[in-house]
Image (cartoon, rainbow, N blue to C red):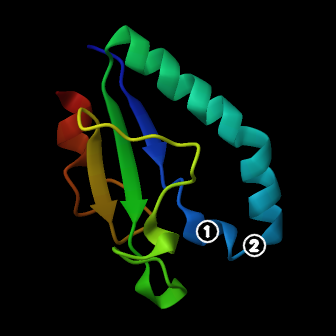
Amino acid sequence: MKPALVVIDPQNGWLELSESLKRSVDEHVNNMSKAISIFRKAGAPIIFTYHSFPAKGIKLGTKGFDFFPSIKVTSSDANVIKTHQNAFNNTDLEKLVRE
């Protein structure tokens, strides 16, 4: 089985909801970027999830839906849009992870 990196919901909209979450992200986003870089260099799959949560202003086409500026997505990355907290619920994430 080949390793894959799953990056869960690194979206701008979450930062606007909680100052403590923003501080936590600020502390850890560098580690996310490093992990993404390591997996990219190894040619390993990277899967990003987006949480669509219109009630909180996080919906496709808005700044809140976009990823943090330091998180770079490429055309070779897989993307999963979810509407539940559980990224496996009604998505193709399990299939992507098993490939």
For residue 56, above or below residue 40: below
- Displayed quadrant of residue 28: top right
Query: What kind of residue is marked 1?
Result: Trp
- Displayed quadrant of residue 98: top left
Q: Is residue 60 left or right of residue 20?
A: left
Q: Are marks 1 and 2 in contact (CB under 8 Å)?
A: yes
Check disc 2: other Cα within 10 Å, few if <14, some if 14-19, many if 20+.
few
Per the rendering, the mark at residue 14 is 1
Check disc 1: other Cα within 10 Å, few if <14, some if 14-19, many if 20+.
many
For residue 48, above or below residue 99: below
Instruction: Give the distance between the C-alpha atoms of the residues marked 1 and 2, in whole angstroms.
Output: 7 Å
Per the rendering, the mark at residue 37 is none
Q: Pick out the residue farthest to the bottom.
A: 55
Q: Is residue 83 left or right of residue 35?
A: left
Quadrant holding the C terminus: top left
Quadrant holding the N terminus: top left
Task: Residue under label 2, please give it.
Answer: 18
84 or 26: nearer the viewer: 26
Query: What kind of residue is marked 2?
Result: Ser
Q: Is residue 84 left or right of residue 20?
A: left
For residue 83, above or below residue 36: below
- The local secondary structure at tag 1 comes to helix
Q: Pick out the residue farthest to the top.
A: 42
Q: Is residue 39 left or right of residue 75?
A: right
| Residue at x-position 36% and y-position 25% | 4
Q: Give percent across and percent down for residue 88.
A: 31, 53
| Residue at x-position 38% and y-position 41% | 73
Q: Give percent across and percent down for residue 11.
A: 53, 60
